Image: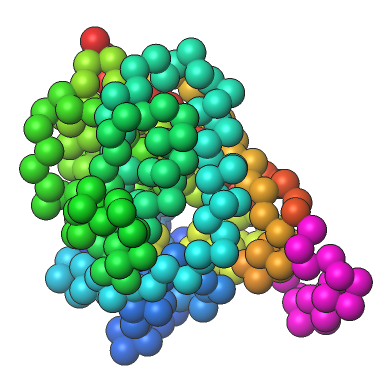
């Protein structure tokens, strides 16, 4: 199916940035699992010459993509504490913005690990949405609070939530504008959405080019600070804060994810020197943004 520039709503001014490099039979639920070592599969990547938006087109049909996400794996259970530490830090650093802590929703919540982190910061009621059946099966006592499926399929009441989080998910969506409008709908007036996504203008994206992990078959729309700002304003939000995300992970994670030469040799040396569990904080090229529904 064909996708369209989110800002210009036309593909008349696009050019091909990269050609598609896989066959449909290459795709499995494993390929659509989060935080894997990427195969560097990607669709044809287009770049709009008018607004600078970068996106995949054409893509697989919705039904095929939905099925792949339902069978995807949560293969990063050992890393959830590091994800929580990296992402919750920005809420803790900006406590004054998060005054009301009654209800929070996470879109793409996996096993619910960040929902537990939100509970620890004072949110009294949490809910999640997650398409991966395996991930939801790992959610324990939060299972009855997680909708197994897609946010578009939910029927949360308007003006329900003080906070909606959506991490590394908006760029996976076929129609992120509709999802952002629905986030606007379910937030209370004055409520905040906290989004994180890849920055297609980051240094690592420029350095690695087509080998960058951001060019991936899971990523349909890619953003940078300018296109993201225009996008959220188009959906009716006010921008409260736009910032670069610092991630803290063990060296083993960075080596697994980085598309670098001599990776096996470097990994061997790091293991020999007992460095694989050393935690390193870097800015790998992710954008964070706090946006508010007007009161």
Where residue 231 sits: x, y (%)? 33, 33
| Colour convention of the picture | rainbow
- Residue 157 relative to residue 99: left or right: left
In magenta segment, residue 201: no
Q: Does residue 42 appear in this view?
A: no
Asked whether residue 109 appears in the rendered view, the answer is yes
205 over 124 or under it: above or below: below
Above or below, 118 relative to 61: above
Residue 266 left/right relative to 113 = right
For residue 102, side relative to residue 113 (left or right): left
Return the x and y of residue 98 as percentages of the image width and height. Answer: 42, 19
Q: Please identify the quadrant where the C terminus is shown.
A: top left
- Is 24 on the left-hand or right-hand side of 209? left
Residue drawn where x is 51% and y is 59% of the image: 214
Q: Residue furthest top?
A: 295
Q: Position of residue 240 (x, y in %)?
A: 44, 19
Observer-nearest of 192 and 160? 160
Q: Write the start and end of the magenta stretch as one range.
A: 259-278
**Quarter of the rendering containing residue 246:** top right
Quadrant where the N terminus sits is bottom left
Residue depicted at x 21% and y 68%: 66
Query: Is residue 275 highlighted in magenta?
Result: yes
Q: Nearer the viewer, residue 1 or 31?
A: 31
Residue at 56%, 73% (x, y): give it: 37
Q: Position of residue 211 (x, y in %)?
A: 59, 68
Which quarter of the picture shows residue 177?
Answer: top left
């Amino acid at each position: 199916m064909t996708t369209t520039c989110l800002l210009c709503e036309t593909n008349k001014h696009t050019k091909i940035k990269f050609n598609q490099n896989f066959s449909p039979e290459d795709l499995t639920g494993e390929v659509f699992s989060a935080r894997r070592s990427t195969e560097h599969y990607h669709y044809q990547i287009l770049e709009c010459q008018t607004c600078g938006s970068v996106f995949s087109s054409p893509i697989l049909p919705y039904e095929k993509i939905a099925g792949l996400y339902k069978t995807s794996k949560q293969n990063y259970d050992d890393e959830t504490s590091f994800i929580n530490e990296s992402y919750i830090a920005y809420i803790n650093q900006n406590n004054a913005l998060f005054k009301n802590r009654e209800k929070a929703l996470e879109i793409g919540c996996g096993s619910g690990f960040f929902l537990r982190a939100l509970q620890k910061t004072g949110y009294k009621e949490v809910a999640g949405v997650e398409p991966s059946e395996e991930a939801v099966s790992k959610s324990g006592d939060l299972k009855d609070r997680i909708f197994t499926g897609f946010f578009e399929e939910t029927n949360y009441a308007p003006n329900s939530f003080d906070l909606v989080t959506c991490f590394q998910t908006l760029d996976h969506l076929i129609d992120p504008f509709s999802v952002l409008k629905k986030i606007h709908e379910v937030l209370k007036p004055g409520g905040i959405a906290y989004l994180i996504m890849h920055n297609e203008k980051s240094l690592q994206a420029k350095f690695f080019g087509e080998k960058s992990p951001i060019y991936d078959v899971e990523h349909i729309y890619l953003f940078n600070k300018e296109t993201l700002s225009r996008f959220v304003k188009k959906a009716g939000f006010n921008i409260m804060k736009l910032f670069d995300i610092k991630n803290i992970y063990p060296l083993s994670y960075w080596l697994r994810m980085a598309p670098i030469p001599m990776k096996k040799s470097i990994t061997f040396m790091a293991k020999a020197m007992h460095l694989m569990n050393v935690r390193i904080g870097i800015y790998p090229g992710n954008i964070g943004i706090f946006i508010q529904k007007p009161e």
